[in-house]
Image (spheres, rainbow, N blue to C red):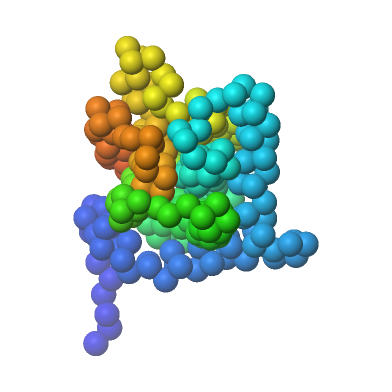
C-alpha cells in the first residue's frame, strides 16, 4: 500500500520544540564545525582562545596601574581575570551568534530545521573558549597561592546566568542582523564599549550608592560580581539588589529573545 504524506497547517509549529531534540545531531555538528573553522590552519591553534583574554588583561593592568584603581585586596591580575572570564564568554557568544544565521544562509534557505539550533551552537563554541581561559585562571590562582573560598561552589549558577545572557542577547542580534545588516558594524562597537561599561576594570562597590541599582540593570554586572565573589571572596561581596536585578534581566532577555526569534524565524529564508 502506498504511503500518503499529509500536510497539515500548523503541524510544524506545534512540533517545533520536539524537533529541537530530533535535530540534536545537527546542533553538535554545527558546534564542532565552527570550532574546526576557527582554529584550522592557525599558527597557535586553540591558544588563540587564551591569547585574547591575556592581551585584554595586560592592557587593563596598565590602565589600572595608571589610575590606581581598587583591586579589593587581591592581586590585580586575579581581580581582572575573574572579570574577564564571564565578559569574554558573553562578548564572544554575542558576536558569534549575531553572525550565525548570515554565515549559514545556504543551509537556512534550502533545508528545514529549527533555526534556533544555529545561534545555540555558537554559544557552545564560545563556551569552549571559556573553558580554555578558565584553565589559565586556575594556574593564576596557583601562581599567587590563592585559595578560593567555599563560594566557588556557587560558580555553576553564575555560569548558567552567563549562558542565559549570552543566549538571549545572541537571539536578538541574530534575528536583527538578518533583517538589518548594519548590525554587523554595530555589534563590535557595543562589545568594545561594553568592556568599560561592565565592571571588568573596576569594582561595582566603586559606583556611587544612588546609582548602583540603576547600573546593575545591566545583567552582566551581577554576573561579573558573582564570578569575583565565587573565585576571590574577601572584599568582593555581592550587591544583592543588583544581583536580583541581573537575574530578572537575564530571565527577561532569554524570554524576549526566544519570542522575537520565533516571531521572525519564518521570514529568515526569504530575507537571508
Q: Which residue is drawn at 33% across and 15% down?
A: 209
Q: Residue 163: tell me if it is visible.
A: no
Q: Is residue 133 above or below residue 66?
A: below
Q: Which residue is drawn at 59% across and 50% down?
A: 103
Q: Which residue is drawn at 45% across and 33% down?
A: 72
- Residue 95: percent from the left, percent from the top? 55, 42
Q: In this view, does 28 lie above or below 247?
A: below
Quarter of the image where the C terminus is located: top right
Quarter of the image where the N terminus is located: bottom left
Q: Which of 67 and 272 is in front in this view?
A: 67
Q: Which residue is drawn at 26% across and 75% down?
A: 4
Extreme residue in the right direction: 43
Residue 55 found in image quarter? top right
Extreme residue in the bottom direction: 1
Q: Please indicate whether residue 178 sits to the left or right of residue 9 in the image.
A: right
Residue 3 found in image quarter? bottom left
- Residue 181: percent from the left, percent from the top? 58, 33
Amino acid at each position: 500500500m502506498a504511503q500518503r504524506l499529509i500536510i497539515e497547517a500548523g503541524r510544524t509549529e506545534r512540533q517545533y520544540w520536539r524537533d529541537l531534540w530530533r535535530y540534536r545531531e545537527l546542533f553538535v555538528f554545527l558546534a564542532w564545525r565552527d570550532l574546526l573553522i576557527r582554529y584550522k590552519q592557525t599558527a597557535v591553534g586553540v591558544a588563540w582562545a587564551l591569547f585574547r583574554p591575556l592581551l585584554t588583561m595586560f592592557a587593563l593592568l596598565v590602565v589600572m596601574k595608571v589610575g590606581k584603581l581598587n583591586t579589593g585586596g587581591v592581586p590585580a591580575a586575579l581581580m581582572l581575570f575573574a572579570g574577564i572570564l564571564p565578559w569574554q564568554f558573553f562578548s564572544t557568544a554575542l558576536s558569534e551568534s549575531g553572525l550565525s544565521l548570515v554565515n549559514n544562509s545556504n543551509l537556512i534557505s534550502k533545508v528545514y530545521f529549527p533555526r534556533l539550533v544555529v545561534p545555540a551552537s555558537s554559544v557552545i563554541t564560545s563556551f569552549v573558549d571559556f573553558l580554555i581561559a578558565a584553565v589559565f585562571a586556575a594556574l593564576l590562582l596557583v601562581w599567587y597561592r590563592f585559595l578560593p573560598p567555599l563560594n566557588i561552589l556557587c560558580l555553576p549558577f553564575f555560569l548558567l546566568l552567563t549562558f542565559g545572557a549570552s543566549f538571549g542577547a545572541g537571539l536578538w542580534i541574530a534575528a536583527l542582523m538578518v533583517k538589518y545588516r548594519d548590525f554587523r558594524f554595530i555589534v563590535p562597537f557595543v562589545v568594545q564599549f561594553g568592556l568599560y561599561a561592565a565592571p571588568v576594570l573596576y569594582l561595582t562597590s566603586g559606583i556611587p550608592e544612588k546609582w548602583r541599582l540603576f547600573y546593575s540593570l545591566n545583567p552582566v554586572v551581577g554576573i561579573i560580581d558573582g564570578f569575583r565573589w565565587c573565585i576571590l571572596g574577601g572584599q568582593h561581596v555581592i550587591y544583592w539588589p543588583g544581583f536580583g536585578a541581573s537575574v530578572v534581566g537575564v530571565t527577561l532577555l532569554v524570554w524576549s529573545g526566544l519570542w522575537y526569534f520565533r516571531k521572525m524565524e519564518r521570514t529568515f529564508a526569504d530575507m537571508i
